[in-house]
Amino acid sequence: QVQLVESGGGLVQPGGSLRLSCAASGRTFSTATMGWFRQALGKARDFVARIGWTWPYTGGVPYYVDSVKGRFTISRDNARNTVYLQMNSLKPEDTAVYYCAATTTGGGSSWYDYNYWGQGTQVTVSS
């Protein structure tokens, strides 16, 4: 069992930056991969980024959806049981509820690869 709590969402102007945090608790030692997904109003839940959490998955490099490459950075701090999503050069199309997710089996880019989910945090990019 893993519990995830997102924070850091809010309203930001286009071109601005925001950092999301996902605090994990429970059996994090069994977690293979942590990921970020987002869901805009009326849209499906889409993959954003993922990163390995425990060995050997930490040997892999972070992976991003094409639309955020060069703008978003996923990182981890295992000592704090936290994964981050640094979002720069934000665009209105980035507006969505962002969800943190974890998998114990090694996650890919599909939502059904993940076992645990946070409650979501709203990110709104608007002038």
Image (cartoon, rainbow, N blue to C red):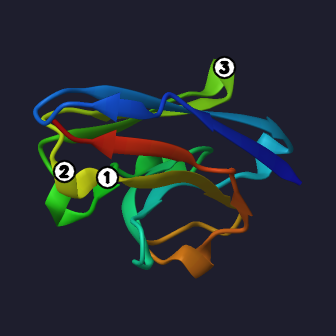
Seen from the viewer's position, the closer of residues 57 and 84 is: 84
- Secondary-structure class at tag 2: helix
Q: Residue furthest front?
A: 127
Residue occupying image coordinates x 62% and y 27%:
78
N-terminal of the pair, mark 2 or mark 3, is: 3
Q: Is residue 96 above or below residue 72?
A: below
Q: Is residue 65 above or below residue 34?
A: below
Please tell me how crowded label 1 is: few (under 14), some (14-19), or many (20+) other residues with Cα within 10 Å: many
Q: Amino acid at mark 2?
A: Pro
- Distance from disc 1 to disc 2, alpha carbons, whole Å, reads 6 Å
Where is residue 115 drawn, in percent x and y? Answer: 72, 68
Tell me the quarter of the picture where residue 19 sits: top left
Q: Are marks 2 and 3 in contact (CB under 8 Å)?
A: no
Quickly name the residue at label 1.
95
Quickly name the residue at label 3.
80
Q: Amino acid at mark 3?
A: Arg
Where is residue 67 drawn, in percent x and y? Answer: 16, 61
